[in-house]
Image (cartoon, grey):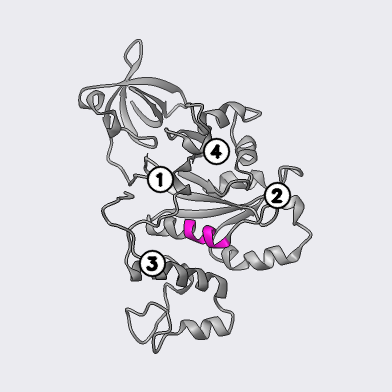
Amino acid sequence: MRGRVLEVLADVARVVDATGQVHLCQFRGRLKRDVDQVLAGDWVDLAPTRPMAMVERVLPRQNRLVRPPLANAEGLLAVFCPIQPMGSLALLDRRLVTAELLGLLSAIVVTKADLWADDPTVWQRLAPWRAIYPMVAVSSVAGDGWERIPDMLGDGVWVMTGESGVGKTSLLRRLLPDGTGTGAVGALSGRTGRGRHTTRTVALAPVGTAWLADTPGFTHLELPPHDALTLRDAFPEWRDARCRYGDCRHLDEPGCVVPQWLATGQISAERHQHYRLLQAEPEPSRHRPWM
């Protein structure tokens, strides 16, 4: 029997099979000696033994994230608030670039739409991000927009991330399938009793046909290991630029086409400024792996 690991707790795991049944499982052999080999998101082979099912082996992974510890991640769901409190678009870009460097898809949820829906300048400012990434606006007051998120995610495992106060808890209460959301929110918020930002485990909950992992791991703001050209290509809007030199970083080099695109408004000056700031940072240590 095949299943996906929803959560690993001490020496047991919660695993969901193809029928949707959740099994509390023990580990066999080497997995029992080193349970760190099993991560939320893993596909595993199960033996339906009694009194608990047994995880026999971990199937080959699409990827493995170290921070947060998660297997087979498909995408990153960035939650952003443009008002009360005003989120940082620079931090949003840092998270989106992190996803690009890790080979993940990205989508953006813009919260508290009831507070800004009548202000056209909000959508105008977000236009460069809307042109690149799937984006939906939601309101916990009006109850609008939430129904679009499952289709936006599709299948696979998604990691949710966002600054404090952006409305992630309200988002979870709307998305998770236990009516009020309180049970699933509690599971995702951590079982240690130490608060949301000290969660020790990663837990997955279903959102449509996708699985959502709400974890503090992506609040870590150091970018994954990269070089200058990899970081350049983490911005899709100039990924296909044909400059004079193939190793052009789009930072004032001769023959670069990006200044012309900036002058005509073809690309966002704000996004390019965020890119400049990221390129100016020291390259992160390659001895601290992300995958």
Residue 79 screen position, x and y as percent: 58, 50
Residue bounds of the magenta highlight: 89-95
Say which amino acid is labelled 1.
Answer: Ala
Q: Which residue is mark 4?
A: 207
Between residue 75 and residue 45, name the one nearer to us.
Answer: 75
> What number is the disc on residue 73?
1
Query: Marks 3 and 1: which is nearer the front?
Result: 3
> What number is the disc on residue 112?
2
> What number is the disc on residue 231?
3
Q: Residues within 10 Å of mark 2 (few under 14, many from 20)?
A: many
Tell whether label 3 touches label 4 (CB within 8 Å): no
User: What SS does tag 4 mark?
Assistant: strand
Q: Residues within 10 Å of mark 4 (few under 14, many from 20)?
A: many
Side of 48 where 218 appears, left or right:
right
Main secondary structure of the magenta stretch: helix
Q: Is residue 93 found inside the magenta-colored segment of the image? A: yes
Say which amino acid is labelled 2.
Answer: Lys
Looking at marks 4 and 3 on the same chain, the residue that comes earlier in the sequence is marked by 4
Tell whether label 1 touches label 4 (CB within 8 Å): no
